[in-house]
Image (cartoon, rainbow, N blue to C red):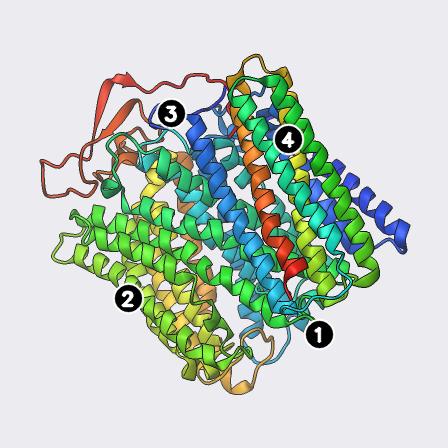
C-alpha cells in the first residue's frame, strides 16, 4: 500500500492547491463584482497541477533544492518505482507507454461510439452536442497518444540506450514532463461533466470562446500537454548533443535518433504557437479580450497560429515513426539502411518545410487568395523528402531475405498505408480539389491513413520490436500475427471505404447525414467495430507476455544497435560496461563492421553525485 | 543525497549541458514572444491610440536595461569570487525588477481607463505586458532564490550555475522587452 503513497499525496496536494487557487480567484473576482466561475477554474487548476507535481515526488527530488535543502531521489525499486516521480528514463518511458495505452483504448472506445452513431443516417444515439464532444475527445486523446507515445514513450526508453548514454541530459525535467500528463487526461475526461466541448480538437473561435465550460477544461489540458511536449523536445535535443557514447559520431547515429532530433526541433519551437492560440482563447473567455471577435479581432488569427503548430505537429508524430520503421526494416532485412545520409537530409528538409505549409489548412477560410498558390506548391514540395524516406525503405527491402516477424509486418504496413495517405494528401494540398474536399470524410480518411496507418502502425511495430528489451520477456508471435492481420485488413476496409462518402461530399463533424451515404457508412461502421476487436489479441498478448512470457535473450533480433547490446531489461545505468562506438549501426553483411565494443575496464558506475541544477 | 546523474558517457561537464538546456528553452520561449508580437500586427495593424503613456514606457525600458547591467555585474562578481558584491548587485537587480512590476501595475491602472481588455489595443497591451511581467516575476523569484544560495554557499563553485542561469534568464526577459516596447509604444 505504501507504493500508492506518492499518488495519494499528489492528489491531496492537488486538492489543497485547487483550494488556494480558487480562494485567490474568489477574492479577486469577489472584490470587483460577481465571483466568476471560469477564472476560479483556471487559477485553481494551475495551483492544483503544482500541488500534484510536488506531491508525487517533485518536491523531494527537486523543490527542496531551491530552498537550500538536500534532495533525495531513488530511481530503483520494484513496481512501486513506476508510481512516483522517478528520473530513470526507462521508468519514464514505461510510464508514458502504459498510461498512453489506456488513453488509446479509451479514445478507441469513443471511436466505437462515433461509428455506432454514424451507422445510419439519423441522429439516434447521442444528442448533437454529445456527439461533437465524443468526436472532439476522440480526436484530442488520439492526438495526445500520437504525439506522446512515440516521443514520450519510445524515445524516452530507447533514445538514451541507442546512443549509448546512461540517461537523458535532464532527468528531472524528463520526470516533470511525464507527470504533467495525468492532469491533462483528468481534465479531458472531466470536460463532459462541464458541458463538454463541441468544438473539435482544433477548437476554432468564435465557437471555442462561446462553448460551455468544458471547452475551457479542454484548453487548459491542451496547454498543459504543450508544456510537456516542449520540455521533452528540449531534453532530447540536449541528450543527443551531449550524451552520445564515445565514437558515436553524427554519421554513426542510428536513424531513430536522427528522427527524434528532427521531431524535437519542431516540438521545441512550434508548440509555443499553439500555446499562444490556446492562451488567447482562455483570455478571451475570462478577460473578455477581443482577439477573434469583431471589432478589432479576427478569427483567422487563431487558424494561423493554431496550424503554425498543428501542421508541424504531424511531423512530430510521423518523423520518429519513420525512424522506427526504417530502423526495424534495416534490422529485419539484414541489410544496411539504404541512402542513410539522404534520409537524414530529408528529415532536415521536412522540418524546414513543415514550418511554411500551415496555410493549406486555410484554403477555404477566407485567407488572401494570392497565398493559395505558394502554399500549394510548398505543401507539395514535402512529398520530395517524404519520397526519399520511402525510397530508403524500399531500397533496404530490395532483394533482401526478410525475417517476417511481427515488428517487420507492422513496418511494412506503414509503407503500404502511408503511401495511400500520402497520395490522397495531394488532392488536399491542391487548391482546386481541396475547395470541394475540405471538411469532408475524405479529409478524415486521409489523416487516419497518415497518422493511424502511418504512425500508429509504426508505434505497434516499435512496441513489438522493443517489447523484449522493455519487459525482458518475449511476446507471443502467433497472437502478434493475428493482431497484425486483423488490424491491417480491417483498418484498410474502414478507411478506404471512408474515402467514398467523403469524395461525394459527406461532411465531417455531423451526427446526422443525408441518407444516400448510409450504405458506405454502414460498411465503415461494421469494419470499424471489427477493427476495435482486433486490439483484443494485442491487449491479451501484452499483459500475458509481460507477466508470463518466456525470458527474452539480450538480443533476440540480432540487431547491431546499442540498445540490444545490454541485458533485457537494461540495468539502471543502462550498460554494464561502457560502450565505445567503432562503426556503422547497420553494417549487416560485412563482418568487419562492428558497431560498438565494450571495455570491461570501464565498468559503468552509478555513483552518487551532488545534485546539480538541471 | 543520492542523485541519478548520468556522469559516465558524456564528454561535456554539467555546466555546459545546463547552458545548452537553458539556451534551448530560450529559443522555445522566444517563439512564444514572436507569436505574441505577430498577433499585435494581425489584430491592430500599426495603429496606436493617443493615450499611451510615453514617459512611463520609456521609464520602464530604462529601468529594465539598467537592471540587466546590475545583473551582469552580479554574474561577473560571482565569477571572480566576490560574493559580497554579487549579493549587492543581485539585490539591486531584484529591487529594479520589483519597481518594474509596480510600474506595469500603474500602466494597467491607466490602461483600464483608456483601453480596457475588451478593446483591440487593450487586448494586445494586456496580453503582451501580462505575459512579459509574468516572466519578470519568475526572474525576480529566481534571483531571490539565487541571492539566498549565494549567501549560504560555502564555495563559489556551488552557486556558479545558479547565478549564471538566473542572470541569463533575466537578460532574456530584458531582450524580450526591448522588442515589446517598440511594438506597444513606438509603432504607428
Q: Residue A122 or B32: which is nearer the viewer?
A: B32
Check disc 4 and report the residue beneath it. Answer: B143
Label 3, secondary structure: give it.
Answer: loop
- Residue behind mark 2: A384
Which-is-in-front pick, marks 2 and 3?
Answer: 2
Quarter of the picture containing the N terminus of chain A is: top right
Distance of mark 4 from mark 3, alpha carbons?
Answer: 35 Å
Query: Reading the chain from its start, which is encountered first: label 2 or label 1?
Result: 1
Asked if marks 1 and 4 touch (Cβ < 8 Å), the reply is: no
User: Which residue is under mark 1?
Assistant: A294
Residue A614 image position (x, y, % from top left): 51, 30
CA–CA distance in space, label 4 to label 2: 49 Å
Q: Are marks 4 and 3 on the same chain?
A: no
| Callout 2 touching callout 1 (CB < 8 Å) | no
> Dot 1 lies on which element?
loop
Q: Position of residue A391 (x, y in %)?
A: 22, 61
Q: Is residue A437 above or below residue A134?
A: below
Q: Residues within 10 Å of mark 2 (few under 14, many from 20)?
A: few
Q: Report whether mark 1 lies on the same chain as mark 4.
A: no
Tell whether label 3 touches label 2 (CB within 8 Å): no
- Residue A117 is situated, as x and y percent measured from the top left of the image, at 58, 72
Question: Which image quadrant is residue B99 in?
Answer: top right
Judge whether residue B51 can be spotted in this image.
Answer: yes
Vertical placement of residue A27 versus A281, above or below: above
What residue does disc 3 label?
A573
Amino acid at each position: 500500500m505504501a507504493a500508492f503513497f506518492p499518488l495519494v499525496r499528489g492528489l491531496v496536494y492537488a486538492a489543497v492547491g485547487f483550494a488556494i487557487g480558487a480562494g485567490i480567484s474568489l477574492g479577486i473576482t469577489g472584490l470587483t463584482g460577481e465571483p466568476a466561475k471560469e477564472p476560479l477554474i483556471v487559477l485553481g487548476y494551475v495551483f492544483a497541477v503544482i500541488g500534484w507535481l510536488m506531491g508525487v515526488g517533485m518536491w523531494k527530488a527537486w523543490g527542496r533544492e531551491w530552498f537550500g535543502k538536500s534532495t533525495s531521489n531513488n530511481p530503483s525499486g520494484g513496481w512501486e518505482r513506476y508510481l512516483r516521480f522517478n528520473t530513470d528514463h526507462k521508468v519514464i518511458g514505461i510510464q508514458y507507454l502504459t498510461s498512453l495505452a489506456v488513453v488509446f483504448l479509451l479514445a478507441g472506445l469513443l471511436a466505437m461510439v462515433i461509428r455506432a452513431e454514424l451507422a445510419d443516417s439519423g441522429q439516434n444515439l447521442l444528442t448533437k452536442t454529445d456527439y461533437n464532444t465524443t468526436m472532439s475527445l476522440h480526436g484530442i486523446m488520439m492526438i495526445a497518444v500520437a504525439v506522446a507515445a512515440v516521443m514520450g514513450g519510445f524515445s524516452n526508453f530507447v533514445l538514451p540506450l541507442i546512443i549509448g548514454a546512461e540517461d537523458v541530459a535532464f532527468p528531472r525535467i524528463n520526470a516533470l514532463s511525464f507527470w504533467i500528463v495525468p492532469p491533462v487526461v483528468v481534465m479531458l475526461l472531466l470536460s463532459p461533466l462541464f458541458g463538454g466541448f463541441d468544438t473539435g480538437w482544433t477548437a476554432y473561435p468564435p465557437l471555442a470562446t462561446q462553448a460551455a465550460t468544458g471547452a475551457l477544461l479542454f484548453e487548459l489540458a491542451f496547454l498543459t500537454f504543450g508544456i510537456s511536449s516542449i520540455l521533452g523536445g528540449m531534453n532530447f535535443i540536449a541528450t543527443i548533443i551531449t550524451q552520445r557514447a564515445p565514437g558515436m559520431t553524427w554519421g554513426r547515429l542510428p536513424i531513430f535518433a536522427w528522427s527524434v532530433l528532427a521531431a524535437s526541433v519542431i516540438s521545441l519551437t512550434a508548440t509555443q504557437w499553439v500555446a499562444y492560440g490556446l492562451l488567447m482563447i482562455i483570455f478571451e473567455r475570462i478577460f473578455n479580450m477581443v482577439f477573434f471577435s469583431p471589432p478589432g479581432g479576427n478569427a483567422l488569427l487563431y487558424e494561423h497560429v493554431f496550424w503554425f503548430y498543428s501542421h508541424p505537429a504531424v511531423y512530430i508524430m510521423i518523423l520518429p515513426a519513420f525512424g522506427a520503421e526504417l530502423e526495424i526494416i534495416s534490422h529485419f532485412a539484414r541489410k544496411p539502411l539504404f541512402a542513410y545520409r539522404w534520409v537524414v537530409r530529408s528529415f532536415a528538409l521536412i522540418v524546414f518545410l513543415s514550418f511554411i505549409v500551415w496555410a493549406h489548412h486555410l484554403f477555404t477560410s477566407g485567407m488572401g487568395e494570392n497565398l493559395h498558390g505558394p502554399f500549394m506548391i510548398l505543401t507539395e514540395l514535402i512529398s520530395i523528402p517524404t519520397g526519399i524516406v520511402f525510397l530508403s525503405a524500399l531500397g533496404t527491402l530490395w532483394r533482401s531475405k526478410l525475417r517476417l516477424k511481427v515488428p517487420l509486418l507492422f513496418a511494412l504496413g506503414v509503407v503500404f498505408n502511408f503511401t495511400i495517405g500520402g497520395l490522397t494528401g495531394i488532392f488536399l494540398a491542391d487548391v482546386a480539389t481541396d475547395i470541394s474536399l475540405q471538411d469532408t470524410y475524405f479529409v478524415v480518411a486521409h489523416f487516419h491513413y497518415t497518422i493511424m496507418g502511418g504512425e500508429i502502425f509504426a508505434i505497434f511495430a516499435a512496441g513489438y520490436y522493443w517489447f523484449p528489451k522493455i519487459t525482458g520477456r518475449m511476446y507471443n508471435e502467433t497472437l502478434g500475427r493475428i493482431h497484425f492481420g486483423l488490424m491491417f485488413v480491417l483498418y484498410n476496409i474502414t478507411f478506404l471505404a471512408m474515402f467514398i462518402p467523403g469524395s461525394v461530399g459527406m461532411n465531417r463533424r455531423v451526427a446526422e447525414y443525408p441518407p444516400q451515404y448510409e450504405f458506405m457508412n454502414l460498411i465503415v461502421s461494421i469494419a470499424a467495430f471489427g477493427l476495435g476487436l482486433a486490439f483484443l489479441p494485442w491487449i491479451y498478448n501484452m499483459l500475458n507476455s509481460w507477466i508470463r512470457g518466456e525470458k527474452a535473450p539480450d538480443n533476440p533480433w540480432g540487431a547491431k544497435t546499442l540498445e540490444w547490446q545490454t541485458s533485457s531489461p537494461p540495468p539502471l545505468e543502462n550498460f554494464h560496461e561502457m560502450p565505445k562506438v567503432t562503426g556503422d549501426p547497420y553494417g549487416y553483411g560485412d563482418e568487419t563492421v562492428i558497431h560498438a565494443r565494450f571495455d570491461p575496464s570501464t565498468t559503468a558506475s552509478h555513483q552518487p553525485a551532488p545534485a546539480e541544477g538541471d | 543525497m543520492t542523485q541519478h546523474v548520468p556522469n559516465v558517457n558524456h564528454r561535456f561537464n554539467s555546466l555546459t549541458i545546463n547552458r545548452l538546456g537553458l539556451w534551448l528553452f530560450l529559443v522555445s520561449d522566444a517563439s512564444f514572444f514572436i507569436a505574441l508580437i505577430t498577433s499585435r500586427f494581425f489584430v491592430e495593424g500599426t495603429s496606436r491610440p493617443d493615450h499611451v503613456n510615453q514617459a512611463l514606457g520609456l521609464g520602464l525600458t530604462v529601468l529594465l536595461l539598467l537592471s540587466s547591467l546590475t545583473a551582469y555585474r552580479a554574474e561577473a562578481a560571482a565569477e571572480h569570487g566576490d560574493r559580497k558584491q554579487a549579493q549587492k548587485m543581485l539585490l539591486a537587480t531584484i529591487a529594479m525588477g520589483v519597481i518594474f512590476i509596480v510600474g506595469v501595475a500603474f500602466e494597467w491602472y491607466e490602461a483600464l481607463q483608456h483601453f480596457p481588455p475588451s478593446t483591440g489595443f487593450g487586448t494586445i497591451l494586456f496580453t503582451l505586458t501580462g505575459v512579459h511581467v509574468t516572466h519578470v516575476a519568475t526572474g525576480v523569484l529566481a534571483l531571490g532564490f539565487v541571492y539566498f544560495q549565494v549567501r549560504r554557499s560555502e564555495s563559489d563553485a556551488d552557486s556558479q550555475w545558479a547565478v549564471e542561469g538566473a542572470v541569463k534568464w533575466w537578460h532574456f526577459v530584458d531582450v524580450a522587452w526591448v522588442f515589446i516596447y517598440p511594438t506597444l509604444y513606438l509603432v504607428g
